[in-house]
Image: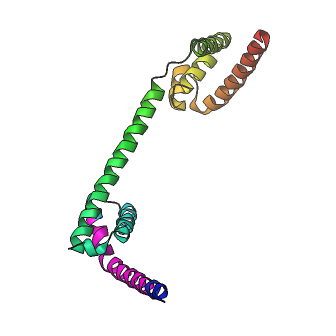
């Protein structure tokens, strides 16, 4: 009998604590979110952190807390600052990772292959006539059609057609050049 009575008492206390927690959550949630918003400035992040604060509050013996609003405010501030520190560490790790990737030197094989490809392109460009070569080089250097027309002495309306023909001729010569080598 005593065991059943103790179980019933524990269940009643647990229900009371849950009801009490629900009331405290409802009453103080907006307050906690506002405290966090003062630091993180993002509503969704503040709400996520507030959830963590209330999980911690739920796990804590509330009878040992003298001033619940003060405890929640302090816990909210600590959680917000911990979040900011964690974000800063994450960003630093990302930047270090990016910097490490940028500092990686290409292998000598990669350098040689790149130089070989550049050499092939130059040889193919030498086979084109001056106007085609100029159009291709200027177009892939970012010049607009008006500049291409001015540099080659042709009308702006015909630049597109001549450029398309030059691209096609370059492609055929490059494929033939690569085929002879391979």
Say above or below: 134 vs 21: above
Q: Is residue 33 above or below residue 88?
A: below
Tell me residue 110's x, y (percent).
60, 16
**Residue 108 in the image: x percent, y percent?**
57, 12
Image location (x, y in percent) of residue 156: 57, 31
Q: Is residue 89 left or right of residue 108?
A: left
Query: Horizontally, is 26 left or right of 169 in the view?
Result: left
Residue 94 at least partly seen: yes
Q: Magenta stretch containing residue 19, yes or no?
A: yes
Q: Nearer the viewer, residue 130 or 99?
A: 99
Check the image and report above or below for 104 versus 88: above
Identify the image quadrant of residue 97: top left
Identity of the residue drawn at 30% across and 58% down: 80
Query: Residue visible at 63% across and 11% down?
Result: 116
Quadrant for the C terminus in the image: top right
Does the stretch in magenta take in 145? no
Is 73 on the left-hand or right-hand side of 147?
left
Residue found 69% across the figure and 20% down from its top: 170
Name the image colouring: rainbow
Q: Main secondary structure of the magenta part?
A: helix
Up-down: is 73 above or below 100?
below
Figure quadrant of residue 161: top right
Q: Residue furthest front?
A: 1
Residue 133's image quarter? top right
Residue at x 49% of width, y 87% of height? 4
The magenta region covers 9-35
Q: Is 176 positioned to the left or the right of 32 in the image?
A: right
Q: Is residue 40 visible?
A: no
Residue 6 percent location from the top left of the image:
43, 84
As rendered, which of 14 and 34 lies closer to the eye? 14
Residue 178 versus residue 22: which sits nearer the camera? 22
């Amino acid at each position: 009998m005593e065991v059943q009575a103790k179980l019933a008492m524990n269940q009643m206390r647990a229900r009371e604590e849950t009801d009490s927690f629900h009331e405290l959550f409802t009453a103080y949630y907006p307050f906690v979110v506002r405290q966090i918003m003062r630091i993180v400035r993002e509503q969704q992040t503040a709400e996520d952190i507030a959830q963590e604060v209330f999980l911690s509050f739920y796990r804590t013996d509330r009878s040992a807390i003298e001033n619940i609003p003060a405890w929640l405010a302090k816990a909210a501030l600590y959680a917000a600052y911990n979040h900011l520190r964690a974000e800063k560490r994450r960003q630093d790790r990302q930047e270090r990772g990016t910097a490490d990737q940028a500092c990686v030197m290409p292998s000598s094989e990669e350098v040689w292959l790149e130089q070989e490809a550049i050499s092939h392109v130059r040889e193919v460009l030498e086979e084109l006539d001056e106007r085609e070569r100029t159009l291709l080089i200027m177009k892939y250097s970012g010049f607009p059609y008006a500049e291409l027309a001015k540099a080659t002495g042709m009308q702006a309306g015909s630049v597109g057609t001549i450029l398309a023909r030059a691209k096609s001729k370059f492609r055929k010569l490059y494929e033939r050049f690569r085929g002879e080598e391979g």
